[in-house]
Image (cartoon, rainbow, N blue to C red):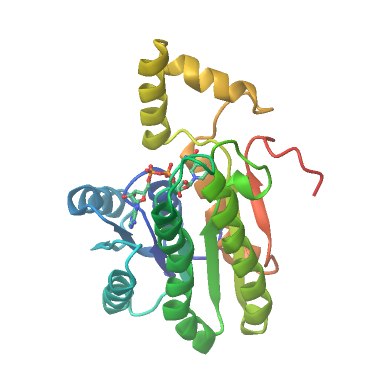
Amino acid sequence: MDLGIRGKKAFVAAGSKGIGKAVAHALAREGADLVICARGREELEGTAMEIGGKYGVKVKAVVCDLSYEESVKAAVSEALDALGRIDILFTNAGGPPVGGFEDVKIEDWDYAYKQNFKSVVELCKLIIPGMKERKWGRIIALTSVSVKYTLDRMIISNSIRLAVTGFIKSLSIELAPYNITVNAVAPGYTLTERIKEIARSNAEKERVKPEDIIRRIAKNIPMGRMADPMEIADVVAFLASERASFITGVTLPVDGGQSRHPL
Ligand code: NAD
């Protein structure tokens, strides 16, 4: 299926590794030019070279810390200079601090608010006006299975991700008359470097192998395994496409059946 986004311009937040990098691959494969942003220059530039070289599209690396408003503003301005416009916005950032109510501090809540919620609002504020003028836009927010299935010891994710869900839903209604769709993708466990690192560190503590930790988690997933990052990215690319033109305001879980929820 031709997704119909060749030549579109995309902003991929937190795109140097993991799910964001996979999304950058998927959009570039479909012929979109990209700006990818993340905090660490070296890895980001390596990813931009890799993707640009593989698909022959323009991929610009822009260093940005999404938890700082000024940094987000500067990144969008650099992206507009490089691409001329932004048609597709993928919002994403590092995971919020982990723990239960007693474990997380007020500063952790502040940090997650800025990084995982406010950055989404800021990116939208800066990028939507151009989409409205051109009467075409796709916004896809990465959230988590935690919006459908309350996770243990993830009280911040369980809370802040739902704020994004509410924001996305409201925005989808306001922007529908402008031919701008706004959706969220809610991944379950996805085998990124970050998850492998968590498995390695838990394995050390428990004196087992990282594969045992991953297998234990996978047992609770009906498909019996974690997602490959490209399985999340391909869904994002579809929602970013011309083919998904009448889908707006949805949260699509991509979780191998983990969120046992009828709707
Ligand atoms: P990852 O650590 O592999 O990649 C995170 C990316 O975000 C990197 O490119 C990193 O440089 C960038 N980043 C982190 N903080 C940033 C900041 N403040 N400003 C700019 N860039 C920043 O992580 P991942 O596994 O790909 O997860 C991505 C998001 O998806 C996270 O929010 C995570 O909580 C969420 N998520 C992940 C899973 C999973 O199983 N991997 C499941 C559900 C939700």
Residue appearing at x 58%, y 24% in the figure: 218
Query: Which picture quadrant has residue 154?
Result: top right
Farthest residue toward the front?
Answer: 102
Residue appearing at x 53%, y 67% in the figure: 139
* Residue 202: x %, y % from top left: 41, 22
How many circles with numbers are drawn on the protein?
0
Q: Is residue 263 above or below residue 65?
A: above
Farthest residue toward the left?
Answer: 42
> Viewed as shown, does residue 75 lie left or right of 250?
left
Q: Quadrant of the N terminus?
A: bottom right
> Viewed as shown, does residue 134 lie left or right of 262?
left
Q: Is residue 94 above or below residue 67?
A: above
- Whether residue 92 is visible: no
- Whether residue 73 is visible: yes
Farthest residue toward the right?
Answer: 262
Q: Nearer the viewer, residue 146 or 123?
A: 146
Farthest residue toward the bottom?
Answer: 133
Residue appearing at x 54%, y 69% in the figure: 138
* Residue 56: x %, y % from top left: 31, 56
Q: Nearer the viewer, residue 114 or 99?
A: 99
* Residue 50: x %, y % from top left: 26, 47
Q: Is residue 252 above or below residue 190?
A: below
Query: Which picture quadrant has residue 137?
Result: bottom right
* Residue 108: x %, y % from top left: 41, 52
Q: Nearer the viewer, residue 79 or 125?
A: 125
